[in-house]
Amino acid sequence: MEQTYIMIKPDGVARGLVGEIIKRFEQRGYQLAALELMNPTKQLLEEHYQDLKGKGFFAGLIEYMASGPVVGMVWVGKDVVKVGRKMLGETNPLASAAGTIRGDFCIEVGRNICHGSDSVESAQREIAMWFPRGVKVASRNTSLHALI
Ligand code: RTP
């Protein structure tokens, strides 16, 4: 089953949007497979955003991402990479449709609340980077039956 890496950035955590973002993914039908609140090192962030090295905003992006705790998550389900990006909205919140996370909660590209992997390959790379001990996906049916 497809997996994606979703990260709530420092502004999303500081603004108390963790529950809201988790709720949206759960309601859509996706399964949470891993979650960690952490203070990432600049080294890890530079590796995560390695494709953007050389952009004028790179140093500011790393400063902002290292400015407070982030919540990293792995979500699992059908087409979760593509649908997850749709749920986040466009990189620039002003171009994001209402109903998306960025379209509903922010206005600044440099404070856009959340990250989502942009391809299945990126997701695999990012999940390995942020959850180096691996991710186990629980069987959904088993856990539901256990509640009955
Ligand atoms: P992300 O990686 O955070 O999910 O964002 P993305 O794919 O939508 O956009 P990307 O091009 O990878 O940019 C990464 C993050 O850099 C910040 N950014 N600032 N000042 C600017 O023009 C600018 N452009 C991008 C945003 O926080 C963006 O999410």
Image: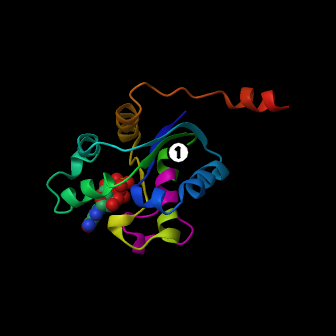
* In the image: residue 19, left or right of residue 65: right
Per the rendered image, the range of residues in magenta is: 84-100
Residue lying farthest to the left in this orientation: 54
- Which quarter is ligand 1 in? bottom left
> Where does the image place residue 106, in percent across and percent down from the top left?
45, 70
Q: Is residue 23 above or below residue 34?
A: below
| Residue annotated with mark 1 | 80
Give the residue at x 52% y 52%. 83
Give the residue at x 28% y 45%. 45
Q: SS for tag 1?
A: helix
Amino acid type of disc 1? Val
Mark 1 crowdedness (10 Å alpha carbons): few <14, some 14-19, many ≥20: many
Give the residue at x 29% y 43%. 48
Q: Is residue 109 above or below residue 74?
A: below
> Where does the image place residue 118, in percent across and percent down from the top left?
38, 49
Give the residue at x 61% y 44%. 30
Coloring basis for residues:
rainbow
* In the image: residue 58, left or right of residue 99: left
> Where does the image place residue 88, in percent across and percent down from the top left?
48, 59
Q: Quadrant of residue 126?
A: top left
Residue lying farthest to the right in this orientation: 148
Q: Quadrant of residue 47?
A: top left
Quarter of the rendering occupied by the N terminus: top right
